[in-house]
Amino acid sequence: MAEVPDESKPSYSALLKNRPFSHLFVGQLISQSGDAVFDVALLWLVLATTGSTVLVGLTQAAVLVPAVLISPLAGVYADRVNRRNIMVVSNLFQGAITAVVSVLYLLSSLHYAVLIVLVLALYTGAQFYRAASGAIMPRMVRKGDLGAANGLFTLSQSFNQLVGYSAGGIIIYALGPVVPITYDSLTFFAASFILILIAKPYGVPRGASSDPTGPRASFSVDFKEGIRYVRGNRLFLEIMVLGLLVNFFFTAASTLLAPYAKFAVHGNASTYGFLLSAFALGVVVGSVLIGKVNFRRYVGKLVFFGIMGIGLLIATAGLVTSIPVAFADFVAVGVVLAAVNVPISTVIQARIPGEMLGRVNTVLGATLAGAQPVAAVLAGVLAGLTTVSTVFIGSGVAAAGATLALYPVFKELVSAQY
């Protein structure tokens, strides 16, 4: 098939006709459908078996910690080992871990200490998959279609969350946690078999030596090289600073979404679920829209104005007392967030040398995730001292204000394109 010029309009149909990309997309679509129901099942299982909200919080921390501590190491491996093979092995590993969780629960042997170890192992394995999948995509599609490709991946994740959060709750209520956990295990195995269909050459890091027996840098050298690359790149430093600020303020609001549903809009647990679904619905819509737009020449401006818009929407949510209005507000947040995340992910993929995509991507991701635990703790404290609505308003205004203040300073990011 003749190569399409980079300036042509992004095309979903062309992407899905690209066999290597379609295998990657379908594999991830299947495994994410299991992830969504597992997310619901995991925390319900802890609460039902221990009755402790403290242990629920510790479990959520176990889910998040590997993204901060393990993902940079996984990124180095993604630049040293065939990325397709990493994804296959990671899926098989995660499938085995979730199967063990299911079996131990059936045998009444799933003690909390064992569960925490399994959760840490499960999400450690996930970091290797994420590092490899993020790095392999630019080998499969041309630059002009990277935005549409990222839009499809964001769309699939959000669609699975939209369906999985509600379906998972219904299945757990009717049948217990074993069915969704077992389903998650099966989706990992199914995805691994689909990923095997991707030809091995697509998994070889661009620029990697064709002689695997030849001399190569040590693991520590590769790891430090990824950090040095980020530190020496003005654009990525600006992304990190802006991302840390934004994640800090936005995490404060997302942490308090359940109490927001109860105290701000006077709803209940179902209200919380609907708000989560509203956000996921917005991301689905935003992913579809942004994936059809050729934003290559104004990525930076889209990111800045999008973040300011999200901040104002979160602040507005703090003033809302009506459930339907809150629902509409969170749909809008999801739409704008997709319009921010897809372009910034695309410009990062396009700017990083192919042989360094794994380690640089994960260094950036780990740094950006580092602010989230601190923000969650502070949000809870501040909400106790004031109100949930006050934290929403303050977080939203602070995020929009900080982004506006950085606009004239972060010139590399404002003018970013690919």
Image: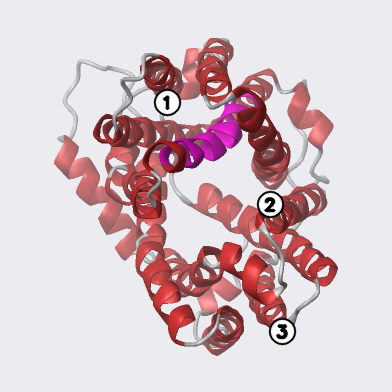
Is 29 colored magenta in this rendering? yes
> Are there few (<14), some (14-19), or many (20+) residues within 10 Å of tag 2?
some
Name the kind of residue labelled 3 in the image: Leu
Look at 26% across and 57% down and name the residue there. Answer: 228
Above or below, 355 against 364 in this view is: above
Name the kind of residue labelled 2 in the image: Gly
Drawn side of residue 27 relative to residue 370, left or right: right
> For the residues marked 2 and 3, what is the alpha-carbon distance in whole angstroms?
20 Å
Residue 273's disc is 2
Circle nearer the viewer, 2 or 1: 2
Q: Earlier in the sequence, mark 2 or mark 3?
A: 2
**Residue picked out by circle 3:** 319
**Residue picked out by circle 1:** 83
What residue range appears in magenta? Answer: 28-46
Q: Based on the displayed image, in which of its 4 quarters is residue 106 positioned?
A: top left
Magenta highlight: main SS:
helix
User: Foreground: 303 or 307?
Assistant: 307
